[in-house]
Image (cartoon, coloured by chain):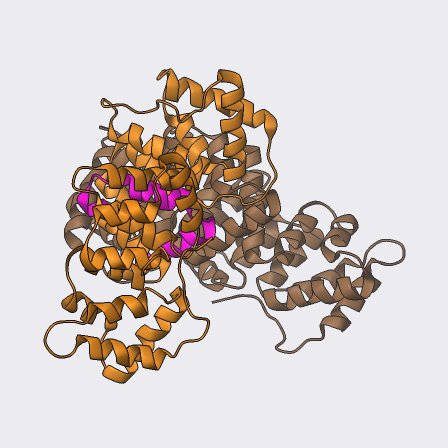
Chain colours: A brown, B orange
Amino acid sequence: MATLIAPSNHSPQEDAEALRKAFEGWGTDEKTVIVILGHRTVYQRQQIRRVYEEIFQEDLVKRLESEIKGDFEKAVYRWILEPADRDAVLANVAIKNGKNYNVIVEIATILSPEELLAVRRAYLNRYKHSLEEDVAAHTSGHLRQLLVGLVTSYRYVGDEINPKLAQTEAEILHDAVKEKKGSYEETIRVLTTRSRTQLVATFNCYREIHGTSISKKLVDEGSDEFQRALYTAIRGIKDPIKYYEKVVRNAIKKVGTDEDALTRVVVSRAEKDLKIISEVYYKRNSVLLEHAIAKETSGDYKKFLLTLLGKED
Amino acid sequence: MATLIAPSNHSPQEDAEALRKAFEGWGTDEKTVIVILGHRTVYQRQQIRRVYEEIFQEDLVKRLESEIKGDFEKAVYRWILEPADRDAVLANVAIKNGKNYNVIVEIATILSPEELLAVRRAYLNRYKHSLEEDVAAHTSGHLRQLLVGLVTSYRYVGDEINPKLAQTEAEILHDAVKEKKGSYEETIRVLTTRSRTQLVATFNCYREIHGTSISKKLVDEGSDEFQRALYTAIRGIKDPIKYYEKVVRNAIKKVGTDEDALTRVVVSRAEKDLKIISEVYYKRNSVLLEHAIAKETSGDYKKFLLTLLGKED
């Protein structure tokens, strides 16, 4: 369930004109930007971009970049892009920063196979490189194998599972992930090629055999990048909602707040399942997500996030 | 350039009825099967399948399988499928046989990125597994890394190349492939992620630096499966026409003839570039391809292949 509140009918032309007016004169009228863009679906936003360019002969995205600043700008920028294009940008930033590979794992494990394909297509269009090409060029060893395997996967989507395989592969995961014995090759194969349904069956087998969840105590202070990526992959496949709740929780909890992570989850999920993530957050933390966010953010950035959460005044 | 000769207008209904008539009574009228199906484009063949099923309430492909036999049946069966579906079948047979991985390398390196994607989609539909899932489950080590990397690739298609990268990566290939020193990891990365244009530039650099083609003397009697797959990948990327010419040449030269390989090339390329392959074959062997094939094959199988070559009487 989405949190975004958008009118069923809107006039792209009126929106474009109101935005243009908000940019004109001294300073920017941020409120208008928030009120309009924070209440439009992905389709409506693309219409506004198109009409804006037609009327004013300039790129709305570029204009926004020059008008607003900081976390607010980042959030609006990510929001106005089409989802596949946004994820391509997020992936590229993660590759360049060279340490936030969990963003890549998140995209690769949580999106549907067709959505992931759309991201790869958008990435090619933007950067004239393939996503896997850039991932592979910046990593090595098991980390490369895992990440490239994840971003290039095109998994079977369907209910057919093989229970025997789930048992065998639960043990493969156990040996490598918990016992840390043997090679990671087989673990990478299982996690990068099996369908989500099959993997969930495998994780359930794991719990039945070993009495504990596979994602429990998988990483600690001493874990390396590969192990953290493995952990993210398992959690992203196992339960996307719980995964996102934890990303938001950690982002808020962090000293200084991790705005990038917070923005990413709100912007990526506001039209999808942010309502459910927010409910799970409340159950886990006994604090409403909007209150927690309001406490840790400020200004237009705060207003914009709360608008996407469907909670502005 | 294609070799297939097909009428620009045909009646799918008349074709379906003529085929049905060819199946009826004692024995099958193979000549009609060849005359009709051997002269229809992929689109026309799919129309015939659809209309045949509508009129006679049976699957034309299944009926054909029960009517004809041997290499002829295999060739007609492969021919009547849509290209992506055919390649999915070829890949699956190769995985099951467990030793003809060059078919998989061929599909993954010669098809365009979108065509390869269509094969992966067709594979999923047919087998309820992903192509990479089955490849990975049947292989290990470097062979797995190479094959999975190739079949999951979605390469940049465009003219932009990075000449400096071509030089660096020519040396990476040289060290691993010729000197056999260091790990194959980087070689696999380069071959599975770079665009075809970039790789051709890299191979050209290789030749300039080392005075010899990268594919020269790459494999010998002692080469293992991985090295053979690597060799096939390099040749498929480097020059598909020359690659196919050699596949056909070896298939014909082989004691007893390799009908599977011969059928694969004729059926896969008859609507694409079989004319050029055939010209290159003639230059290389001073024998017309149709004569060479006619000498090594017989009966309906021979007639069918020659029809696809545009050379029946």
Along the viewing direction, whichever of A249 and A259 lies nearer the viewer? A259
Residue appearing at x 30%, y 68% in the figure: B35
Examine the rendered structure and indicate whether residue A79 appears above or below residue A218: below
Q: Quadrant of the C terminus of chain A?
A: bottom right
Examine the rendered structure and indicate whether residue A183 appears above or below residue B136: above
Residue A158 in the image: x percent, y percent? 30, 62
Q: Is residue A1 left or right of residue B119?
A: right
Along the viewing direction, whichever of B242 and A42 lies nearer the viewer? B242
Residue appearing at x 30%, y 38% in the figure: B249
Residue A20 in the image: x percent, y percent? 81, 62
Along the viewing direction, whichever of A230 and B189 lies nearer the viewer? B189
Residue B67 in the image: x percent, y percent? 15, 69
Residue B296 in the image: x percent, y percent? 22, 46
| Magenta region includes residue B96 | yes
Examine the rendered structure and indicate whether residue B83 appears above or below residue B153: below
The region drawn magenta spans: B94-122
